[in-house]
Image (cartoon, helix red, strand yellow):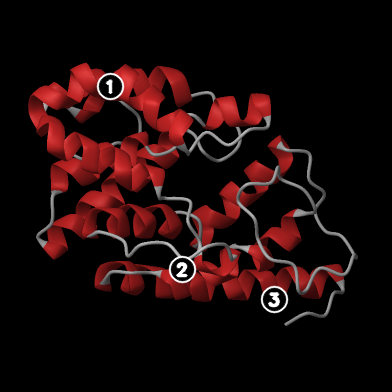
Amino acid sequence: MSGKFPFVRLAFPAWFEPVMDRVWLKMKDDSTGHDFLHAVRVMELAVDIAAELEADQGLAMAAGLLHDYYRKEEKQTGQLHYGQEAIEGLRHEFESLLVPYLKEERFERMLQAISRHEEYPFAGGAQRPPLSVDEQILQDADRIDAIGAIGIGRTFMFGGAHGLSLADDEEWSDRIFDPGQKPHGSVYRHFYEKLLHLSDGMHTGPGKRLADERHQFLVHFVRQLEYELKLNRC
């Protein structure tokens, strides 16, 4: 069933094709690094992790594909759409497509996982309840796609789409990353604010293993970037 969509290797069931169609049409022209291909990679990473953990692969598949469905509106409005607004939108658009197969309880667990996928322990804020296995899987899959070679490429896509400079010389070493703020600063700053912290926050055994290799590549790239920019942070 996957031949219709580019870069999809997962053999998804026939009932899932209308969901893929809707996501493809909405996200295929995104230029921020949160496009259809990102959704597909996170979906497939989530399914792989769920399979290794003997967790719910169908839920992981749906959550991975839909987790960034409202990123286009976020860029257009400057508002965050991964919160309750997105959850209600996903319920409205996908309940009729998914509930007959996931059933209501699993559909709600999927929405709950999506609602928590932008929580970062290094971002500060109030203490959150422990994550369920479904929530851990989605967070790990999403963050694995934000590091390594793909993560670096996506970071420059994100910076270009939001008008960020390559680097800045302001003092920001003690700044706390805030996912609720509009993108600002520089691409270089984003590595330190967010990406270099991600591997430490992996939850699952497979997630930690996959993240470790990508993190080492990320560190090497940042050091080379600093060398070429004549910066001195590492």
**Pointer 3 residue:** 223
212 or 202, nearer to the observer? 202
**Residue 144's spot in the image, x, y percent?**
42, 59
Element under label 2? helix
Residue reaching furthest to the front = 126
**Pointer 2 residue:** 214
**Residue 60's spot in the image, x, y percent?**
23, 46
Element under label 3? helix
174 or 38, nearer to the observer? 174
Residue 61 shows in this picture: no
Could you classify mark 1 by the number of other residues whose Cα lies within 10 Å: few (under 14), some (14-19), or many (20 or more)?
Answer: some
User: Looking at the picture, which amino acid does disc 1 mark?
Assistant: Phe
- Say which quarter of the image contains residue 162: top right
**Pointer 1 residue:** 94
- Say which quarter of the image contains residue 98: top left
Classify 65 as above or below 197: above
Mark 3 and mark 2: span between their CA atoms?
14 Å
User: Looking at the picture, which amino acid does disc 3 mark?
Assistant: Arg
Residue drawn at x 70%, y 35% is 161
Contact (CB < 8 A) between labels 1 and 3? no
Residue drawn at x 87%, y 70% is 171
- Say which quarter of the image contains residue 193: bottom right
Mark 2 and mark 1: span between their CA atoms?
33 Å
Q: Earlier in the sequence, mark 3 or mark 2?
A: 2
**Residue 103's spot in the image, x, y percent?**
10, 31
Classify 33 as above or below 30: below
Contact (CB < 8 A) between labels 3 and 2? no
Residue drawn at x 62%, y 51% is 155
